Amino acid sequence: MVLKIYVDGSSLGNPGPAGVGVVACDEKGNIVATHKVPLNTATNNEAEYKAIIEALKLAQNLGASEVTLLSDSELVVQQLSGNYRVRSLALRRLHEEAMRLIRHFRHFKIAHIPREANKMANKLAQEASFAASSKVNQTRRRIKISPSILSADFRRLGEMVRELEAGGADWVHFDIIDGRFAPNITFGFPVIEALRSETSLPFDVHLMIVEPERYIERFVKAGANILTVHPEATYQLHRTIHTIKEAGAMAGVVLSPATPPEFVRPILHLLDLVLVMSVDPGFSGQKFLPFVLDKVRTIRAWIEDLGLETELEIDGGVTEENAAEVVAAGVTVIVSATGVFHSGKSIAEAISDLRRAAEQGLEVKG
């Protein structure tokens, strides 16, 4: 069988809720199959690659021997044609999967077409994107808990990370401090790399280091899924955020208590999260600084005005007593160190109680 397949990937937010659309036609131009898949989150290029992968799988299932793919993404077409280098780690993985699938066909060709010639696949991709967006909107008010291992027992970190996953944590938070940006020295790549195989939870890595752009690729290679940086620590914040995304991780900016929210406003649409520090960077166990909640409210208003899905994280002195208040202000992710590891409860109980207290703030906010 010879197939001509139109593909499209569409993302709401880049990254954001996304979808793929696939329309397979026979030699005479008759539609033999259509396919759409919602994606929780993807960039435009990631969605396009995933559309191509879905198309190749569909062609295999239909028993095609010759396939021509038609895409309106010139970059992805050029990359799969071997003309452009794939720099992003995330795209490189998708590129490799697509190339592996391509080798199953006797003859393969990919070509660029104008968007107006790809209306049906685009329509399917948009429908899938909106379906994904509806699903995200239904679940995004669930508060995430990201325990910081800075207060964990370092003698048995592997065991404690496994306990975090079993106890219902959403992310694992790593405070990387170099002794220059903040007055403490913690740990680096070896700890992240050693713990990566212990859990499937996302690693939420907060870089309290000078010139973080020098180490981004190494942190991602070690296992970081999320990297946040301080604007005061890097000379080119926009470029650093772009480098994090190119390396294949989610990117965020951290605001210390005295750092104004205006630092993130120009690039808010590019960020996966904003982390507001409610204590000064450096040590766990400090008391919560309530004045930062005005900053949280400001950033939450900007996020909603722009229609973004950006996570708003808080770190420092958050307990069961003030968790509802920070959530009511607009927080969606709570970092907790001593509140999880030194609460006098089991890790599972501490996470559950903190989440329960935090979700009371959703009722206030709603």
Image (cartoon, helix red, strand yellow):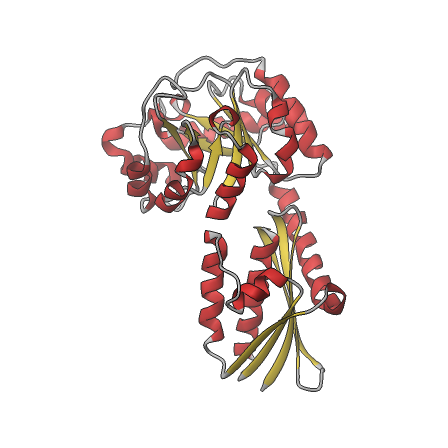
Q: Identify whether 80 is placed above or below 24.
A: above
Q: Seen in the image, is 282 located left or right of residue 230?
A: left
* Residue 143 can be seen in this image: no
Q: Identify whether 171 is placed above or below 59.
A: above
Quadrant in which the C terminus is drawn = top right
Q: Nearer the viewer, residue 82 or 335?
A: 82
Q: Count the marks.
A: 0
Task: Say which residue appears at 46% left-offset and 58% top-offset.
Answer: 92
- In the picture, residue 325 is in which quadrant? top right
Residue lying furthest left in this view? Answer: 155
Q: Residue 345: x percent and y percent? A: 36, 25
Task: Say which residue appears at 49% left-offset and 62% top-offset.
Answer: 95
Q: Seen in the image, is 202 located left or right of residue 259?
A: left
- In the picture, residue 100 is in which quadrant? bottom left
Task: Say which residue appears at 40% left-offset and 37% top-offset.
Answer: 214
Task: Say which residue appears at 49% left-offset and 84% top-offset.
Answer: 106
Q: Residue 68: x percent and y percent? A: 60, 77
Q: Residue 60: x percent and y percent? A: 52, 78
- In the picture, residue 185 is in which quadrant? top left
Q: Residue 201: x percent and y percent? A: 42, 43
Quadrant in which the N terminus is drawn = bottom right
Q: Seen in the image, is 22 located left or right of residue 207?
A: right
Q: Identify whether 45 is placed above or below 31.
A: above
* Residue 187 can be seen in this image: yes
Q: Nearer the viewer, residue 144 or 123?
A: 123
